[in-house]
């Protein structure tokens, strides 16, 4: 199969010969404060050495640019040199607007060298900017941003690639926050785990993304409720001069995107995708068959030079069925406990922005919705309601308002604002559980929650940019209980500093205290008597410290080393199994709907090394190594035990090389330490009553994570070929995941044979004859992707 695909790919490349094509880049350069056009600005295409200068209208045009992905550099005496985001140059190259900021003070004899590696005073450490090149051509990622992020330090990955859970610096998948052009979205994956994040495939179409700011720490003050990471997506603007359509056939879906303009003030960007993931999973013989549809749009209206409005929308419909056509013990085991899942989710939002000289005001209003339904019958026998083990119907809705102002004076920058949030959570659950005996939870809950927050930060940048500092503070509260109402309890200060020791060598550090609200599934959990069982929960907090060295020997290369330490307080701990909620959430279903207490503590610490080398139109290479520990304990007197995310090391090398005639080859090597795991409680699992409740074995939580799996590594390969013509573009790629067919060793599964060994005993004492099934997965997975833009 793989040989045939490769042969077809090469044959297509030989047959489709095309003349060399060049294009034109046009744009405008304006003053960031006054919004007026700037004359005599030098604009260069980075890496090509060609460019032009702006005219009296601030307009520039660069001719004879070969097709590809580039960034521009704008420079002018008296202004800070600017590097733009990456843009694809082809027949539909968008009009590029560049904003330049005036130099506060000119120091004689001081030369400041600009770099495409972004550094900001508020986050001089723990910030990475992911560009278009990486998103488009990352090997093994199939243009899924959740997997692109896994190339970066501190980010664990799901071996074999069946899940997109974001595990950052030893924190759980519920500790991340996501923003789309300033609008917060609950999740970036289909089939998300309610109360956490993750899923098998991303929700955001890569064709819409301009770049992504990935914070693994040092979070900005205006981005709250995060403990492990923040992903801040910047979407492309629609083209104000042309309308175009692009079709993409990817590894798991087919998509159609369009961008252009509506009149002379409004641009649009729209995408619709339909999956065929269920077909792929069926071919692979997997027991779950997910299918999804998603759509997204962006409308941006520029009323005048100082006022603009952006409207955003993102939604998905998810359906997961079970595949009863496959046989074998592995399938029987998974089908025994995996529920059917139906989800609908959407976010609608608007951002109004006003430019008033050195002050920029913005108002962001959004509404998010999640409707999640899980259904499970014992032995998947739906002929009788007596077999029902789980029926969950849950809805989460959030309406958010954020107002903020950013002011810049010379070397100072002030950002301040307020947030208001109204949340509604409802849940109707019937669930059979087994602790010491079989029990039934049958409850309805409806929770209305008002939340509020204040934030401010002040940044300082020395005139020669040798020293930067940022001081910020944030506080949040809500009306769930009396403690959470008191803003001073959630006071969240943070401090960042950076100092240039010698040319291109920076020493930076950050320390801060962050808070996160427990999930609505936990806050709204009720007992059968209708009382809220988790009213005494606190905000989860983590104190973070990090220090790093960054060396940029030239504008194309960066090496960094960063150490971090995170300490968690008031972590929700399960009363049933004694495990923190943060150690759950990397599977399908729901977490948090159980009795919890805020008594657990945790810590994660380690060191991250990263190397990046960017050569325009030639090479994009990155390598990262993370050595760390992640552990928790119950209370201050308990002993630390490894968390579910304590892999100890993560290593990645990923690179893409561009050959002549628009060919490129990428390769990625990924290695991750073995996960800790918990042995089964054989005695409890073999009980007929216990097994019939959840359809899978029970863990011996008294020996939590005392065992460890072997390390795992895989190799991914990607080959791209692009064809550029005067009025259209065609591209094809071959992505081969796990080309070495590496096998992931997992704990042997303990499973019932269905045979009762003591049928004459009372029902409460009857036991199944049990068996163990060896668990090993991993296969070579080749996929072809095709894109066409007109």
Image (cartoon, helix red, strand yellow):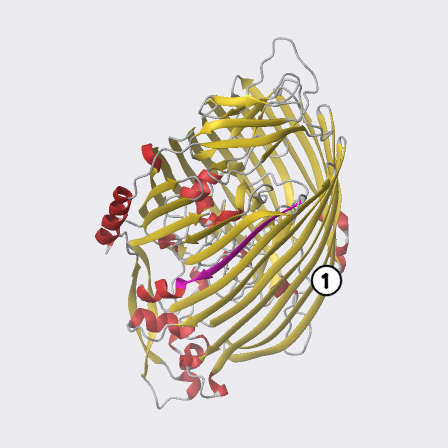
- For the residue pair 79 and 226, the one nearer the viewer reads as 79
- Is residue 271 within the magenta segment? yes
**Which residue lies most toward the bottom here?**
760
Give the percent coordinates (x, y) of residue 125: 55, 33
Viewed as shown, does residue 337 lie left or right of 735? right
Q: Quadrant of the N terminus?
A: bottom left
Q: Is residue 393 visible?
A: yes
SS at circle 1: strand
- For the residue pair 182 and 334, the one nearer the viewer reads as 182
Q: Is residue 230 above or below residue 201?
A: above
Viewed as shown, does residue 188 lie left or right of 354? left
- For the residue pair 513 and 420, the one nearer the viewer reads as 420
Give the percent coordinates (x, y) of residue 226: 61, 48
Q: Is residue 435 visible?
A: no
Instruction: State the image quarter where residue 43 is shown.
Output: top right
Instruction: State the image quarter where residue 472 is shown.
Output: top right
Residue at 71% x, 40% y is 473
Q: Is residue 210 above or below residue 78?
A: below
Viewed as shown, does residue 113 lie left or right of 300? left
Residue denoted by label 1:
449
- Is residue 242 within the magenta segment? no
Give the percent coordinates (x, y) of residue 207: 49, 48
Give the percent coordinates (x, y) of residue 414: 73, 33
Range of the magenta residues?
Answer: 266-277
Q: Is residue 466 above or below residue 668?
A: above
């Amino acid at each position: 199969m793989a040989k045939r695909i490769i042969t077809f790919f090469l044959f297509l490349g030989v047959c489709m010969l095309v003349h060399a094509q060049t294009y034109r880049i046009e744009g405008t350069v304006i003053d960031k404060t006054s919004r007026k056009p700037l004359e005599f600005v030098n604009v260069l295409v980075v890496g090509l050495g060609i460019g032009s200068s702006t005219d009296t209208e601030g307009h520039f045009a660069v001719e004879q640019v070969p097709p590809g992905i580039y960034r521009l550099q704008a420079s002018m005496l008296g202004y800070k040199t600017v590097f733009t985001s990456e843009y694809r140059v082809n027949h539909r190259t968008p009009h590029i607007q560049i904003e330049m900021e005036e130099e506060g003070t000119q120091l004689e004899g001081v030369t400041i060298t600009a770099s495409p590696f972004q550094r900001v005073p508020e986050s001089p450490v723990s910030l990475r900017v992911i560009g278009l090149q990486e998103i488009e051509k990352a090997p093994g990622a199939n243009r899924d941003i959740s997997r692109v992020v896994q190339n970066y330090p501190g980010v664990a990955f799901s071996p074999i690639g069946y899940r997109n859970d974001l595990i950052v610096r030893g924190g759980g998948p519920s500790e991340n926050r996501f923003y789309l052009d300033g609008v917060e979205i609950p999740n970036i994956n289909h089939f998300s785990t309610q109360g956490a994040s993750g899923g098998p495939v991303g929700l955001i179409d890569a064709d819409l993304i301009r770049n992504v700011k990935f914070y693994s720490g040092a979070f900005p003050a205006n981005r709250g409720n995060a403990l492990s990471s923040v992903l801040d997506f910047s979407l492309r603007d629609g083209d104000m001069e042309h309308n175009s359509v692009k079709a993409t056939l990817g590894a798991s879906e087919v998509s159609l995107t369009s961008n252009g303009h509506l009149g002379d003030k409004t641009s649009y960007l729209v995408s619709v995708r339909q999956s065929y993931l269920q077909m792929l999973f069926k071919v692979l013989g997997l027991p779950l068959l997910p299918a999804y549809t998603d759509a997204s749009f962006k409308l941006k209206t520029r009323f005048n030079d100082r006022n603009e409005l952006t409207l955003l929308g993102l939604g998905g419909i998810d359906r997961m069925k079970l595949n009863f056509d496959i046989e074998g013990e592995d399938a029987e085991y998974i089908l025994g406990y995996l529920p059917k899942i139906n989800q609908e989710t959407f976010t609608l939002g608007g951002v109004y922005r006003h430019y008033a000289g050195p002050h920029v005001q913005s108002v962001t209003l959004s509404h998010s919705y999640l409707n999640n339904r899980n259904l499970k019958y014992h032995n998947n026998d739906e002929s009788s309601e007596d077999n029902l083990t789980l029926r969950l119907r849950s809805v989460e809705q959030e309406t958010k308002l954020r107002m903020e102002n950013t002011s810049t004076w010379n070397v100072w920058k002030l950002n301040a604002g307020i947030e208001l949030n109204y949340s509604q959570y409802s849940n109707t659950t019937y669930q059979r559980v087994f602790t010491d005996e079989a029990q039934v939870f049958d409850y309805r809950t409806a929770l209305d929650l008002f939340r509020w927050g204040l934030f401010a930060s002040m940044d300082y940048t020395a005139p020669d940019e040798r020293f930067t500092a940022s001081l910020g503070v944030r506080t949040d509260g809500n009306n769930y209980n009396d403690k959470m109402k008191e803003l001073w309890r959630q006071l969240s200060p943070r401090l960042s500093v950076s100092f240039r020791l010698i040319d291109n060598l920076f020493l930076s550090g950050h320390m801060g205290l962050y808070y996160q609200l427990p999930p609505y599934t936990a806050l709204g959990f009720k007992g059968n008597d209708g009382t809220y069982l988790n009213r005494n929960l606190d905000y989860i907090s983590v104190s973070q410290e990090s220090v790093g060295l960054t060396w940029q020997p030239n504008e194309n290369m960066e090496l960094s080393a960063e150490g971090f330490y995170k300490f968690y307080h008031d972590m929700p701990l399960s009363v049933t199994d004694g495990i923190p909620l943060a150690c759950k959430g990397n599977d399908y279903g729901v977490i948090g709907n159980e009795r919890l207490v805020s008594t657990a503590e945790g810590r994660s610490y380690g060191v991250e090394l990263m190397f990046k080398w960017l050569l325009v139109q030639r090479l994009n290479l990155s390598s990262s190594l993370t050595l760390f520990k992640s552990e928790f304990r119950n209370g201050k007197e308990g002993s630390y035990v490894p968390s579910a995310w304590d892999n100890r090391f993560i290593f990645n090398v990923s690179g893409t090389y561009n050959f002549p005639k628009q060919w490129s080859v990428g390769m990625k090597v990924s290695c991750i330490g073995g996960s800790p795991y918990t042995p089964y409680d054989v005695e409890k699992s073999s009980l007929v009553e216990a097994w019939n409740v959840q359809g899978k074995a029970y863990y011996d939580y008294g020996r939590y994570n005392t065992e460890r799996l072997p390390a795992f590594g895989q190799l991914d390969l990607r080959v791209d070929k692009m064809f550029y013509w005067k009025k259209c573009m065609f591209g094809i790629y071959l992505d081969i995941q796990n080309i070495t067919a590496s096998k992931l060793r997992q704990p042997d599964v303990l499973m019932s044979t269905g045979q009762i060994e003591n049928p004459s005993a009372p029902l409460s004492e009857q036991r199944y004859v049990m068996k163990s099934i060896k668990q090993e997965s991993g296969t070579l997975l080749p996929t072809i992707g095709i894109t066409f833009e007109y």
